[in-house]
Amino acid sequence: MTLVVVGLAQLIVVLDATVVNIALPSAQADLGFSDGDRQWIITAYSLAFASLLLLGGRLSDLIGRKRTFVIGLAGFAIASALGGAAGSFELLVAARALQGAFGALLAPTALAVLTTTFIVPKERARAFGVFGAIAGAGGAVGLLLGGVLTESLDWRWNLYINIPIAAIAIVGAILFVPSIVRTGPRPKLDVPGTVLVSAALFSLVYGFSNAETEGWDSPLTWAFLGAAVVLLVAFVVWQRRAAHPLLPLSIVLDRNRAAAYSSVLIAGAGMFGIFLFVTYYLQATLGYSPIQTGVSFLPMIGMLVVAAQLGTNFLVPRLGPKVMVPAGMVLGVIAMVYLTHLDASSTYVADIMPPLMIMGFAMGTIMPASMQTATLGVDRQFAGVASAMVNTSQQVGGSIGTALLNTLAATAATDYLASHTPVTAAVGVDAALASYATAYWWGAGFFAFGAVLSVLLFRRRSQGLSLANAHLPAAAAEVPVLAH
């Protein structure tokens, strides 16, 4: 029951990253905001979510997982209600930012509850299989649900839908999420570290979001990206000397965990090539409706769930992440290369469904193994912030992937139109296809880089954080596991 509750919480967080996308045209027509302002409905959520994740994770360590979890769910539901009832663009943006803030409290707490609840290896594997499947499939579920709600009801239901889910999860959390009684003195919050890393993550995500809309030649883009680098360096320097560090550097400097965080980031960047450009292709080139587009992703979700369960229950315990994660990355490369062959006459069964299924299997292989490794053996008092690093990696990866792939695709379309004059409707379609293919090739490059990096970074099972050690209490397991 704890797993069901945690799964519901994770679902509403990942759902809201994509469910609103399909509702945007309807919301724009209703509230009358411009095309230039439209991106803020998405950006407000991602900025608040990304910049506050580490703070949210640390708060769950300091004030208790159960309490933080319930506060996060209640706040998310209230923010969703405000957004659904919004009568103006400004109120909708404010509600989306509030959703992101409470999401930043909720997401790492959900993963930390999982990490500290399931400590028997077999149960832990099953739990992370389900959680990883939800994390990977939530975006596709959001596209499907967004289409159904927008076409059948109203765009506002894309926000209202969170309220009943959150209500069920709150009741479940009160009944089934265990309360951990703290022993010893309560640690203090690292305020300077929190300010530095929140500002750094905000600058990083805003810089990439600005690059997506204003281009890479925008001074604002480079000002924010430069500020992000400076602030991250300052954060690392401060963490080395802080009495109560927000993120002890030993957590991210462990090779296995560094490999896991990197894999989640790269997979997040590559995945946006699928959701973003396949959605464009299905709707703009093939003329699919929003509901048809969402249904088209169902085989991908199915394969993701199968791979997540197969991997965490049978393959990861036997082979370890050093084999599983690179194998998933290679499958990601194959799926992306397959997609580069799509054209205006492609059919769903022969040309679109196979690469989506391969990508689903890839994500189901990468995400649960990486998430399980990223939080394994962490001292219980830092489980929240270690979990937050998983969400941060996924969010930053998504921001980088969206900005880079969008820019590369737009440049490819412009170059194609410039070299094919006069520009006719057919040339316009071909230019769009060329831009999508460019994004897929770069996405394949992301996954190829991820395959090489994960092979090099993950330790062999005899050297690293063995999954067999997972049954130890996390606080007790930390020293012997890392020393070994």
Image (cartoon, helix red, strand yellow):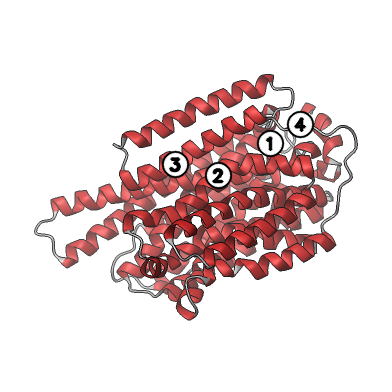
Determine which residue is flagged by label 1.
Answer: 460
Cα separation between marks 2 and 1: 32 Å
Badge 3 vs badge 4, beta-carbon distance below 8 Å: no
Determine which residue is flagged by label 2.
Answer: 50
The earlier-in-sequence mark between 2 and 1 is: 2
Identified at 32% across, 59% down, the residue is 34
Badge 3 vs badge 2, beta-carbon distance below 8 Å: no
Q: Residue furthest top?
A: 241
Determine which residue is flagged by label 3.
Answer: 206
- Element type at mark 1: loop
Determine which residue is flagged by label 4.
Answer: 188
Query: Residue 315: x, y in percent?
Result: 69, 53
- Element type at mark 2: helix
Amino acid found under the numbered disc labelled 3:
Tyr
Between label 4 and label 1, give the one nearer the viewer. 4
- Element type at mark 3: helix
Cα separation between marks 4 and 2: 22 Å
Quarter occupied by residue 352: bottom left
Between label 4 and label 2, give the one nearer the viewer. 4
Amino acid found under the numbered disc labelled 4:
Lys
Q: Is residue 335 left or right of residue 479?
A: left
Query: Residue 301: x, y in percent?
Result: 56, 65
The earlier-in-sequence mark between 3 and 4 is: 4
Query: Residue 26: x, y in percent?
Result: 40, 70
How packed is label 2: few (under 14 Cα within 10 Å), some, or many (20 or more)?
A: many
